[in-house]
Amino acid sequence: MDCLLQIVFFKLIFFFVFVYSDNLFKKPLFNTKTPYFWVRNISDVIQENEFSTTILNGQNCQLEGLNILLRHGSRFPTLKWIKRITALHARLTANTAILSNYPFMNKWTNTFLESQEGLLSSLGVDEMKRLGKRYGTRFKVLLDGKLKQVKFATSYRDRTKSSFKYFYEGLNETSPSSGHTPEAKVDNTKTRFYERCSKYIKEVDDNDEILKEANSFEADSKISNIVQKIQTKLGTSNISIDFDDVFVIHQICAFELGLNGQSDWCQFFDIDDLRVISYWDDLEGKNIKDKGNYKQKKLSTKIDLQRSIKPKWNTIKQDMAIQSIGNRLALIRLIFLNDSKKLSRTLENQTGNIQPVDIFFGHQDTILPIFTAFGLFKDTEPFTAANYDANINRKFSTSEITPFSANVAFSLYKCGANGKHAFKIFVNEEPVNIPACGGMVCSYSDVKVYYKELAQCDFGKICDTSSAVRFRGYTILSIVLVLITVMI
């Protein structure tokens, strides 16, 4: 009897330890695989029309225009990760010592189906529905009964199309509109601009040099200690693991914990491990190729906000960030006009037929360049392999700024009768400081002056590596800070 009680006692201890660990990990720790409501409080009390007014220099300002860009909601792993998860599990379970130490592996199966690869998950559905409700409530004055006037756009990926569908469902609950659900235009030019820039692909995406800092950190003792710790935990020297294996375990933990609320694989880590891996992941900003030995095929596709790589790549990335606003994202009704006089007349005469709200559904690489171009989330300390301790609480943390369902909103307000306007930026539903004025509410005129260098850019010149590649050669006459005036 005593023996039985001891067994029950230890099983209970084992259960509570793992439940506690799983809950402890439900924080912004998994970079771009972080669920949205580990960043924002799902229980937030949302006030009706909370963001529909603001104050600038003592004047009350009323919302006139809104543009929202969202990353798709939480998704299933992509095919390359599903295959790596299956392969690692097969390797580990072929060892009897590992199975003896971790019997859960014998019962565990990879529930991520190849047929569902990259698709929106049930968690992503919930995120999008909730976000639709939250936005519909906070900006109700501009959305209630007016959803037919809203312009929606997605990328070609199913996860962005599904995100639109469920976001709209939530939006329609709080700001109902009669009639059928509107169509969302598939616009890869705006939502996946980074795939259309040959210079970026050649000089950034295909250049291993930009991984210098990530590779240096991967060789650091902070990473090697994690690898060695997990090797010891496995309890065998017959199988040798490296950091790539550790990161696969990390991804299983992230996806299962997000989707199921629990993962046995998370037991291999502690909080400090996750912070170290998160730092490496932010340094790398990687997109590992599917072909060949992926350990030698690491390529960067994310925007480095901290300028930790060579100036040449910084220039291209900054230009791409500008372009993503100017030529790609149509933030607050960007217009492609080659005739500056025609644009000026439109602004002066206010004759443009402008929709007050645009909502786009894209990807992490759609949102990050926007942060770059507007100078958001800059850290004072250099973002390098050698500077981990100084950057523990960095602003540039993809876990915080680009989780699943990340969103950025630009709002324009008319202040009083004098024609002045206020401008705000919201990131993940929170107003952020705008460098143009150093505050959360800027005069539109200050924003226009501060970002004047972003007003013109030529996508062909930025992205072209040969005369054979051109994307219609648009001259961008303005970004959001100029063309937002069309709405005035």
Image: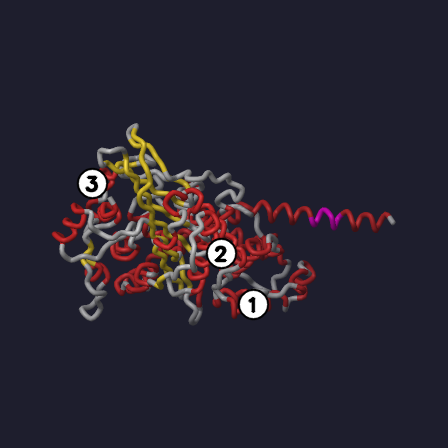
Q: Main secondary structure of the magenta part?
A: helix
* Nearest to N terminus: mark 1 or mark 3: 1
Q: Is residue 60 left or right of residue 70?
A: left
Residue 55 in view, yes or no? yes
Label 2 sits on a secondary structure element that is loop
**How many tags in the picture?**
3
Q: Nearer the viewer, mark 2 or mark 1?
A: 2
Please indicate, yes or no, whether residue 312 appears anywhere in the rendered image. Answer: no
**Where is mark 3, residue-wise?**
449
* Residue 203 position (above or below residue 351): below
At x 45% / y 48%, what residue is drawn? 399
The residue to which callout 2 is attached is: 74
Q: Disc 2 to disc 1, how far (Cα)?
A: 21 Å
Answer with left or right where residue 230 lies relative to residue 312: right
| Image quadrant in which you'd find residue 474 | bottom left
Q: Is residue 12 magenta?
A: yes
| Residue type beneath disc 2 | Ser
Q: At which x and y percent is residue 35? A: 50, 51
Q: Is the residue under label 1 in contact with that under label 2 (CB below 8 Å)?
A: no
Residue that carries the numbered disc 1 in the rendered image: 86
- Marked residue nearer the N-terminal end (2 or 3): 2
Span shown in magenta: 10-15
Amino acid tagged 3? Val
